Image (cartoon, rainbow, N blue to C red):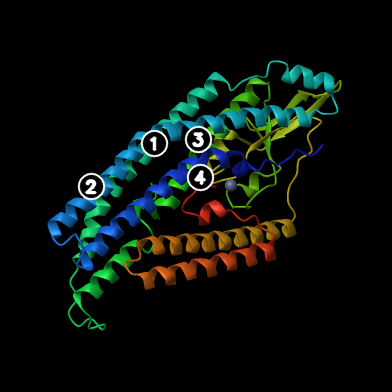
Amino acid sequence: MAPEPLDLPSAVESSTARLVSSYAEAEQRLIAGSAVLIAEYLNGGSVQDGMVLQQALRLVARRIASGLTGQAGGLARDVALEAARVGNLAAIREVTDALRDYPRVREVYTRNAGATTPHGLRAAAHIAADLTDRLNATHYRITRFADDAYRAATATAGIGQVTGGTPQLAQREAWRKLTENGVTGFRDAAGREWELSAYVEMAARTTAIRAFNASHQDRMTALGIRYWTVGPTGFPCTFCLPWEGAILGTATGTFTEPHAVEDGTVAVKVDGTLEQARAEGFQHPNCKHTLIAYFPGVTTLKTRTPEEVAEATERFKETQRLRGMERAARRAKLAEQAALTDTDKALARRRARELQARIRDYTAETGLNRRPRREQLNLANK
Ligand SMILES: [Zn+2]
């Protein structure tokens, strides 16, 4: 029997999409709303006074940040609870599939399976609270964006600036630079810098995967599963690859266990404990590997050949390349929002179209799934 490797990201995609799109839209509104004010200021429109501009920019940013503060807790809870629900159902489905040919044993294992376990729910609530904290921390940065925008709008040209242009040119350039990657300056625990949308997506995805795994593992334990294996799936990273096809348990060694579906016993050689695997990096952030129930005498352990590993690595590189193109398309659309003149707007729009055409070609060429959500700004209409 072949355990079906689970496509974890697709299982949690729906739960993260709403959260990510709320932040992407807020970022868009922040940049578009600030651009209108700055254009007024630079083009001698109704906003003439620097103080008035600064106050107006702060008002836009504060309004957007407080809107997000009102939503963050609920959105985070939805992500974690949805992932826990999917994790529970996936565990039941996997065990049912694994014992498909043994209805009587299957009945024994799954007769008490039901809704998400209390432990899975508690874990999800905890994980949701973590995400809410991380989201709330981004709101300070969003509020501070107003002052960055003000500084850009009032920037003076540097001495010896090659453009030799007017202050207006320096201000346009400073604003373009500030917004070219969206709202930036978010740091993760490892100190890496992120753009807002990418940061929120990473945080939401990590949350979903944690809640999924907690609930999934707890349901499997409740069903009586005592041994696990790791399926050959996803990016064969150095942390997880050694555990593919290995047996995990609560203690290392060889144990004599009853055969899962027949009379007699089976020797089960446990390669490591779950704690050990995790301490060595298994199920790191963004990891797609999940545990698969191991039934003594029934489950076939699966590993990948070097060719399969090479192919999966190649596939991963292609995916990363596509994500890079999607980010570029997103930036071009943000640049359109940020543009202070009609010419810049038209240029950004053309660039966004070109990038979308390249994405279409690349997905057709590689057969990869396009994720328009990552290219879009206005996601609520999708
Ligand atoms: Zn991994």
* Mark 4 secondary-structure assignment: loop
Q: Upstream in the sequence, badge 2 or badge 1?
A: 2
Q: Mark 4 or 1, which is nearer the eye?
A: 1
User: Which is nearer the eye, 224 or 62?
Assistant: 62
Is disc 3 surrounded by few (<14), some (14 to 19) or many (20+) residues within 10 Å? many
The residue that label 4 is drawn on is 285
Q: CA distance from mark 4 to mark 1?
A: 21 Å
Q: Where's residue 294, x and y in %?
A: 72, 32
Q: Upstream in the sequence, badge 2 or badge 3?
A: 2
Q: Is residue 365 shown above or below 158?
A: above
The residue that label 3 is drawn on is 79
Mark 2: amino acid:
Leu
Residue sitting at x 62%, y 62%: 318
**Can you tell which quarter of the image residue 311 is in?**
bottom right
Q: Mark 3 or 4, which is nearer the eye?
A: 3
Disc 1 within 8 angstroms of ligand 1 (CB): no
Q: Is residue 241 shown above or below 277?
A: below
The residue that label 2 is drawn on is 59
User: Which is nearer the eye, 167 or 113?
Assistant: 167
Mark 3: amino acid:
Val
The residue that label 1 is drawn on is 72
Q: CA distance from mark 2 to mark 4?
A: 36 Å
Residue contact at pointers 4 and 1, CB within 8 angstroms: no
